[in-house]
Image (cartoon, helix red, strand yellow):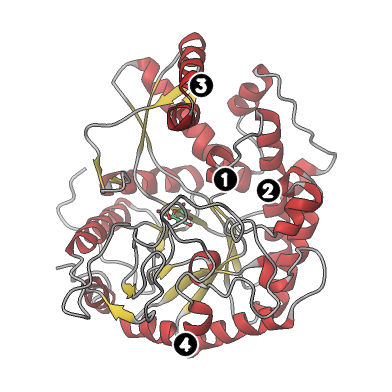
Amino acid sequence: MEHLKLKPFPKDFLWGASTSAYQVEGAYNEDGKGLSVMDVTSVPEGTTDFKVTSDHYHHYKEDVALLAEMGFKEYRFSIAWTRIIPDGDGEINPKGIEFYNNLINELVKNNITPVVTLYHFDLPQALQDKYGGWSSRQCIKDYERYVRVCFENFGDRVHYWLTINEQNMMVIYQSGGMNLHEKYQANHHMLLAQARAMIACHEMLPDAKIAPAPNITVVYPASSSPEDYLASMDYDQLRNRMYLDVAVFGKYPEAFMEYLNQRGVDLDIEAGDFETLAAAKPDFIAFNYYGGTTVKYISIEDGEKAMAEAKAKGGAAEFMVGLMTEPGLAQGCANPLQKRTSYGMGIDPTGLRATLRQLWERYHLPLLITENGCGVPDTLEEGDKVHDDYRIDYLRAHIRACQEAITDGVDLMGYSPWSAIDLVSTHQGITKRYGFVYINRDEFDLKDMRRIRKDSFYWYKKVIASNGEDLD
Ligand code: BG6
C-alpha cells in the first residue's frame, strides 16, 4: 500500500546502534577473562581474529562520547559471559563486573539507554569442552546462573535485556556436523534457557523488559506456483516461527513437530519443559534483519539428489547446497529482483516493512530492530574522511521502511543498526565495515586505532536530532 502521508516516529523512539562483545572489545584474555568459542574459532585466511578487534575495552569512554555526540538514545551491546564467569560455571570475575559497570555508568551519564544482549555467539569454551555446550541440559543451568549474576549486578541501571542473539542462525548455520536430532535438541535447550532467563528477569527486576533476538526475515516464494508458496510458508516456519512461536506462545508449531516426527526425531523433552516455556513471556521482540530469503519447493527425491551431487563435489558447493536444501520442503534460491551488496548481502528495505508487518500481526508485541546494516569496505581519504554515501543510502531506505511500517500500525520501539562503530565481522574480517565510526586499523596492521567520524556519522546525527524527519 502506498501511503499518502507518513506518520512521524514516536517521540520516545530509540535511535541507536549495536555491537557485540567478541567483535568490538578485544582484550580477549585480559583482567581474568576466560576464552569463548569465538576466541578460538578459526577465521578465513586473510582476515583477522577476534583478539584485538576495535579495542573498545580500552577505548570505551571515547567510544561512548562519540555515540553521545551522534545523539544516541540507546546502545545495544553484549556482555561476554567469559568476562563475568571465565570458565562458564565457576568463580565470578570482579574485573569483568567492573568493566561493564563502567561502561553502563558511562552510557547512563550520557543519557543513552543500555540494551544488553546476554549472549551473542560467545559461549565459554570451557563449557564446550566440559559437556559439549548446548548439547547438554547442564548448559541451561549455567546460563541461568550467569544471567542472574548480570541481573543482580547491572539490573539497577539496565532495563532492556536480550536473551540470545540469533539462536535460529546458530541452529541453521552453525551446527555443522550435528544431525537433525542433535541440532534441535540443542535448540530445545536454548529455548529453555531463554525461558528461564525471562522468568528470572521478571522475578528479579519487575520493571525491566526482556526479549528474544533472532534473525528474522520475510520468505518469498520463487514463483507464484502454489507449491512454492507452501514452500515459503514451510521455510518461514523453520527459519522464523519455530523460534518466536515458542518464545511468545510457549509451544512449538504443530507442523514443525510433525516435520521432526516424520524424520524420526523424537526430542528429549522432560516433564516440566512445556510448563517452563509457557510460563515465560517476552515483553517485546528484538530482531536482526539483513534482507529477504527466497525459496522454491523441492521434492524429497530431488532434494536428496541435489545434496548427494553437492557432497560428491565437496567444499563450498556441499556447504551451500546443504545449507539451503530441505528435501521435501524448500530450497533457497537466488532472487534476481533482490539487490545485493558487494559481499552478497541483500538490500531489501521493502522486505523490512513486510517483516515488521508479519511480526506485529503474529505476535502483537512491540518490536525493536537490533541489527540491519551495510557491511562493505570503506576508504579513508584525506587522512580523516570516509565518504560512505552507499551506507547512508542503505540506512535511509531502511529507516523510510520503518516509517512506512509505523504508518501501517506497527508498534516499533527503535532502530539499532549494525554497527555503532567498526568492528570485526563474524565471517569476513574488519575490511567488511559496518560502523558510523571508522577504526583506523587493517586486518593485520593495528595502526593507531584512531576513531574517525564517517559521513554517515554526521548524517545519522541529523536523523536522530530530527527524530527521523530529516533523512536527506
Ligand atoms: C549477525 C550477527 O548475524 O550479522 C553479527 O549477529 C554479525 O554478529 C552480523 O556481525 C553481520 O554478519 P557478518 O558476517 O557480516 O559479520
Task: Judge whether 53 appears above or below 362 on screen.
Answer: below
Mark 4 vs mark 3: which is more N-terminal?
Answer: 4
Mark 4 vs mark 1: which is more N-terminal?
Answer: 4
| Element type at mark 4 | helix
Q: Which residue is mark 1?
A: 170
Q: Which residue is mark 3?
A: 311
Residue 353 visible at all: yes
Q: Amino acid at mark 1?
A: Met
Residue 378 locus on image (x, y percent)? 25, 64
Q: CA distance from mark 4 to mark 1?
A: 32 Å
Task: Judge whether 358 appears above or below 383 on screen.
Answer: above
Task: In the rendered structure, find residue 190 and report the number of the disc placed on it.
Answer: 2
| Element type at mark 3 | helix
Q: CA distance from mark 4 to mark 2?
A: 34 Å
Q: How many marks?
A: 4
Q: Which residue is mark 4?
A: 61
Q: Amino acid at mark 4?
A: Lys
Q: Are marks 3 and 1 in contact (CB under 8 Å)?
A: no
Q: Are marks 2 and 1 in contact (CB under 8 Å)?
A: yes
Q: Amino acid at mark 3?
A: Lys
Task: In the rendered structure, find residue 268 and report the number of the disc placed on it.
Answer: none
Residue 367, quarter of the rendered image: bottom left
Q: CA distance from mark 3 to mark 2?
A: 30 Å
Q: CA distance from mark 4 to mark 3?
A: 50 Å
Residue 169 locus on image (x, y percent)? 52, 44
| Element type at mark 2 | helix
> Foreground residue, 37 or 60?
37
| Element type at mark 1 | helix
Task: Judge whether 243 appears above or below 395 on screen.
Answer: above
Residue 165 locus on image (x, y percent)? 55, 55
Q: Are marks 3 and 2 in contact (CB under 8 Å)?
A: no
